[in-house]
Image (tube, grey):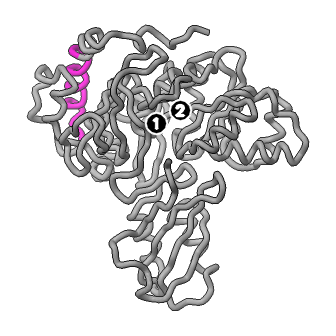
Amino acid sequence: MTRHFDALETRSADERQAALATALPAQIARARAAAGPAGLLADVDPDAITTPGALAGLPVLRKSEIGSAQGATPPFGGLVPGGIAGVEHVFQSPGPIYEPGRTTHDWWRMGRFLHACGIGEGDVVQNCFSYHFVPAGMIFENGARAVGATVFPAGTGQTELQARAVADIGITAYAGTPDYLKVILDKADALGLDVSRLTKAAVGGGALFPSLRQEYADRGIACLQCYATADLGNIAYESPAMEGLIVDEGVIVEIVRPGTGDPVPEGEVGEVVVTTLNPDYPLIRFATGDLSAVLPGVSPCGRTNTRIKGWMGRADQTTKIKGMFVRPEQVADFVARHDAVTRARVIAGRDGEMDTMTVQVETEATDPSVFEKAVEETLKLRGKVILCAPGSLPNDGKVIEDQRSYD
């Protein structure tokens, strides 16, 4: 296996800028022609946008705007050139938001990350990302095909069968959320299964805590993480150097002051705003709601693109728990379902290396079980329900509180 996925990863700054000077105006023109939400780019001259710095003068596109546009112009809100006829798949994310998906070579650009993980021909990847509704499973399968690996499309759940598959098939690599691999390995240990051929892990969709990475390393599993979304595909990824996340060659990343489109000084924490160069889905200055910061210099691994620190929390209260986003509007939906509930607060925590979710409910009711089904339906996750006296929750405006440590 070659050290790098392709020559794009090791370009000089001048070479990268020269390529962007051609690619950026073309992408702006595509997005402008697609006439997305409220014609945000209607007055923009594409030929004037030739550098990442020039993007700062353009409006920021937020997920709420996409949702509103999709309601008026289903299913993609005028953001996909050619509309639904030009794509093989449609996916649904919480909101709901609908995203296109293609089966063409490395469409989500995940091959670059899997290559950095050392995954390629001869590897068998147990893909434990969901194939249901959301594109995560297909994103990693598409990337595995790009590097020539074989895929076992395991999806989520059925942990005992997952563990047996690792042993029976001879799985060499795992793809999924960081903590679910531990669940599988613990089950394999309990069943006395030999899973020693699994030596690589490509994870995303949640925080990879240092203690968990070390636990995998102690078992002989090299675990690297990526930062990707359903809308954008791969945004940034770790290499074996493990010094920050390297921005993918198919996107431009800006770090802006939350709630604005104004870039912050290098090193300052701000919101991640991404412009994708994917011609099939030209998102310009898409605000992810995630926080990060630019790292100085380049990676020791030889990849020369910008590095970011990785996921550092949310610019709003939206929080990722067990690989799924929980949004304030979902909490509001839960409260609205019950006349007996006055307020609710979601607490994201940790139990060992696992994410936990607790829902504090202000109510005079005495049986928490009556709310458990509604919690799962509205928040898309199971969680512990704790009943609280009316007026007892903090009056700080928070409906989602993340108590996990990211040190």
Query: Position of 180 compared to 25: left or right?
Result: right
Query: Position of 284 compared to 323: left or right?
Result: left
**Which of 36/209 is in front?**
209
**Residue 14, relative to residue 283: is it above or below?**
above
- Residue drawn at x 42%, y 14% is 9
Majority secondary structure in the magenta region: helix
**Residue 340, relative to residue 311: is it above or below?**
below
Estimate how packed mark 2 is, as few (under 14), some (14 to 19) or many (20 or more) residues with alpha carbons within 10 Å: many
Question: Gap between marks 1 and 2, in whole Å?
Answer: 9 Å
Q: Is residue 82 visible?
A: no
- Residue drawn at x 55%, y 11% is 3
Which residue type carries mark 2?
Ile
User: Do callouts 1 and 2 mark residues in contact (Cβ within 8 Å)?
Assistant: yes
Q: Quadrant of residue 319?
A: bottom left
Q: Is residue 127 visible?
A: yes
Tag 2's secondary structure?
helix
Estimate the x, y position of residue 398 in percent, counting from the top left: 37, 69
- Residue drawn at x 73%, y 48% is 183
Query: Position of 126 compared to 382: left or right?
Result: right
Estimate how packed mark 1 is, as few (under 14), some (14 to 19) or many (20 or more) residues with alpha carbons within 10 Å: many
Residue 139 image label? 2
Estimate the x, y position of residue 204 in percent, counting from the top left: 54, 39
Segment colored magenta: 21-36
Which residue type carries mark 1?
Ala
Q: Which residue is mark 1?
A: 228
Q: Quadrant of residue 297?
A: top left
**Which of 100/129 is in front?**
129
